[in-house]
Amino acid sequence: MQSELSIRLNDGGYKNWIKAGFCLQKIRDCLIGFVISEMEKFHQFLLHNNSLLRREICKNSCRPQGTKFQGACPLCEVWKREILKHHTIQNNVIYWGNCSPPLWPKQAWEVAKVYMPHGQANTRGPGKCDVAALLNLIISCDRFEFVERQKVIEVASSDWQVQLMETDGVDALKFTDEIDTGEILSAELELLREWIQELCFTMEEQEALHVQHINSLNTFKEFLKQNKELENVLHKEVQQLYAVEKRWKHGVGTVKGQDGVEWNLEENEGLSTMDGKTGEDDSCRRTCAPGLKHKNEEQE
Ligand SMILES: [Zn+2]
């Protein structure tokens, strides 16, 4: 596993992605205690201000989907109204599917997830979500109004790409002798899992995928071929990704090019034909790790 890691770290683009991701994980770790403490207080505040929320529990097992929460029981309707009252951006898209409303009376974290971007349905606490989700929570919930919001927005929208420094030129085999490879591996696995989840979500939720998503998927498959040990460790997530890809190809299967034109996969020769449609040069695709590439594209 370590020798494969050393080879991966000899790729400047990949190492850059790991470093940026590692920094983001450290920022998240620093925010966790603060965010939990504030959300617990916020939850208590909601319960204190409305006795109905304290007394009742949801008996309908209400389950929202994506941005929709239709057919909520009377109690969950009250919760919805109370939560939205404290949203700093009125009429914002809310990812109700992030949370399990029957848990709102008991778990502050399920309330917190209403203020976050998509993809938080399976996170049961702040330790499992990325820093972008925590920053969005701080920006979107007025519990954090004492924090300088503009600064947080600036941080959240920063270009997180880490510049390569001189030491990056050192052969990774030597370089990794001096640092904790276990910590790098663990950060790398977490980043790859996040990236896979994000791509699965995109394939399941969006009617037309962008060409770069398909290219990212193809790049990732090539990457796995060269990193068999990594593929074994990520077996469960990779299988999930392939299952989602299969459903997507048999379902909508529509791809949107950079020119905005959509075409159907079945009318083309398949995913491998996408490479020529991006206008990117080969060296960029080869050196960019899938997650780094995807995150950059999301920011554009
Ligand atoms: Zn309910």
Image (cartoon, grey):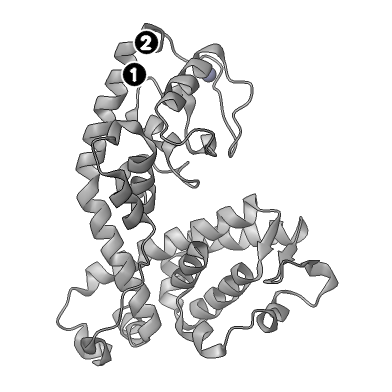
Instruction: Identify residue for label 1.
Output: 46
Residue at point 54% right, 37% down?
97
Q: Residue at x 63, y 21 (%)?
A: 71
Q: Secondary structure at mark 1?
A: helix
Q: Which mark is residue 50?
A: 2
**In this image, 123 relative to 170: left or right?**
right
Within-10-Å neighbours for mark 2: few <14, some 14–19, many 20+? few
Under mark 2, the amino acid is: Asn
Query: Which residue is nearer to you in this view: 43 or 219?
Result: 43
Quarter occupied by residue 258: bottom right
Q: Residue at x 56, y 75 (%)?
A: 221
| Residue 42 in the figure: left or right of residue 203 | left
Can you say whether 273 is above or below 97 in the image?
below
Residue 92 location, x and y as percent? 52, 38
Q: How many marks?
A: 2
| Distance between mark 2 and mark 1 Cα atoms | 6 Å
Residue in the picture at 64% in, 83% down: 279
Q: Is residue 187 above or below residue 111?
A: below
Q: Are marks 2 and 1 in contact (CB under 8 Å)?
A: yes
In the rendered image, which quarter is residue 242 located in?
bottom right
- Give the residue at the far left of this rendering: 178
Q: Quadrant of the N terminus?
A: bottom left
Residue sitting nearer the eye, 149 or 130: 149
Amino acid bearing label 1 = Leu
